[in-house]
Amino acid sequence: MAHEKSDPSAEIHEILRAVDAKAIPEIGDEPVDWLVSLAGYSPGTTAFAFDRVRPKNLLVIHTEETKENYNLLAGILTAEKRIPFSNLRHAACNPTDARSIYEETRKQIPSSNTKQRIMIDITGGKKVMSATAALAAWQLDFEICYVESEYDPVTRKPVPGTTELILIDNPKSLFGDDDIKRAEDLFDAGAYSAAHTLLTELADRVLSPEPIRGRAHLAKMYEYWIDLEFTKAVEEGNRAYRTASNGLKKHGNDQLQRQIALLQEMGAADQKSSILCFYALGKHFQEQHRYDFAVLFFYRALEAVFVDRLVEHYKVDQRNADYIKLGVTEDQLLVVSQNINPTWQRRGLAPDLGFINSLVLLKALDDERISALEAAEGQDIIKVLYNLSLLRNDSVLAHGFKTITKDDAEPFRERAKATLEVFLGAQVKQSMKDLTFLKFANQR
């Protein structure tokens, strides 16, 4: 039995006049700027996709053999004023070459300063053409749709009422590999808030969200850490640690566990852990080229370690230091002060312990840690530290208007590192290493 030869023109008219509520997909309220459709030997699928999507612009990809189908469709669409002729485009492509479809699509769709919603219909053409179009859509991050019908085996036409437009998740969005890499790059650059936002959004749409959420918790932990919200940082760190496949290797998770322990101590106002935290934050901001903040935290680490030495070893009241009880005379304090700055004439110190007061007092006490630091550095470390304090005082974040440079920050870091190692013991080297912010680049 010979099958009746279909009339493409009649088929298009029938499709455009059909009313089938089942066939209208949930494409959302946002209009589609471009529909890219593959033209097969029947233009019906392109007509159906166009009628359901109602794009502002239509680009038809065809082969030389199916070009006439485009001409037919374009004539009907423009004659019925469904789309202006200026909003129609077409391109001939090699159906087996994904690059051909990719390059023609990029060439035909003009670039825009605003994000365009672009959908590609991969129904028409041979299977290999649909596959290559899907690859192009994946790379270009287009939405993908497909016209599905039940076919009558006798008439070899779609059964009325069964044709529908199906939206297909783009594998790029479904698995999120590119976005994960982008989020990890943001994380490694120290943009923790941006990384957390991207990862949280990504976790809501990928097939396997748990590894993404683990990364998001880690980004949030560092965001809280920088804000000195240690309790919240611990909570996020624990969530990241408990999440399987959080992007960290075993050594990374081991380091994360040690960081969580130190953050808990910081939350309990442990003095030595807080000193290490100041140093870690200084190093973080230095890596981010935010040198004013880096110097501020290095300064706080140095000041805190000097005060801690006086409070813990000499039992000095930090807010009301009684120097007479320590057996230090005003003359001794004056000698040390004038060695730092010959113009100083003050004979005593303020009762509050700060950076300079603590340094002067420790030197006047002939403190063994100060002596060990000078021996290790091979120079008059008191003058060096005093000059660094002036640099910090002149900063826009302290009392002055000077912008701190990279060359200013590095000597501060070196002195802070050396001082902490002498004052807090050799084991502090491992703690400093543990507190270095993790990077995903080091986990691959």
Image (cartoon, helix red, strand yellow):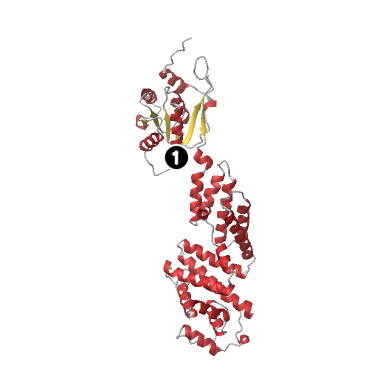
Residue 393 at what x, y percent from top left? 47, 73
Identify whether 365 is placed above or below 40: below
The residue to which callout 1 is attached is: 139
Quarter assignment of residue 251: bottom right
Left or right: 352, with 45 as reference point: right
Left or right: 380, with 69 as reference point: right
The local crowd at label 1, few if under 14, some if 14 to 19, many if 20 or more residues have their Cα within 10 Å, is few
Residue 140 at what x, y percent from top left? 43, 39
Label 1 residue SS:
helix
**Dot 1 amino acid type:** Gln
Viewer-closest of 81 and 295: 295
Q: Which residue is found at the position 61% from the left and 61% from the top? A: 258
- Number of disc labels: 1
Q: In this rendering, does residue 316 appear at all? A: no
Identify whether 425 is placed above or below 29: below
Identify whether 251 is placed above or below 2: below
Viewer-closest of 321 and 430: 430
Residue 381 at what x, y percent from top left? 49, 79
Left or right: 380, with 207 as reference point: left
Residue 67 at what x, y percent from top left? 36, 25
Residue extending farthest top: 1
Quarter assignment of residue 262: bottom right
Quarter assignment of residue 368: bottom right
Q: Which residue is found at the position 46% from the left and 38% from the top? A: 138
Q: In this rendering, does residue 371 appear at all? A: yes
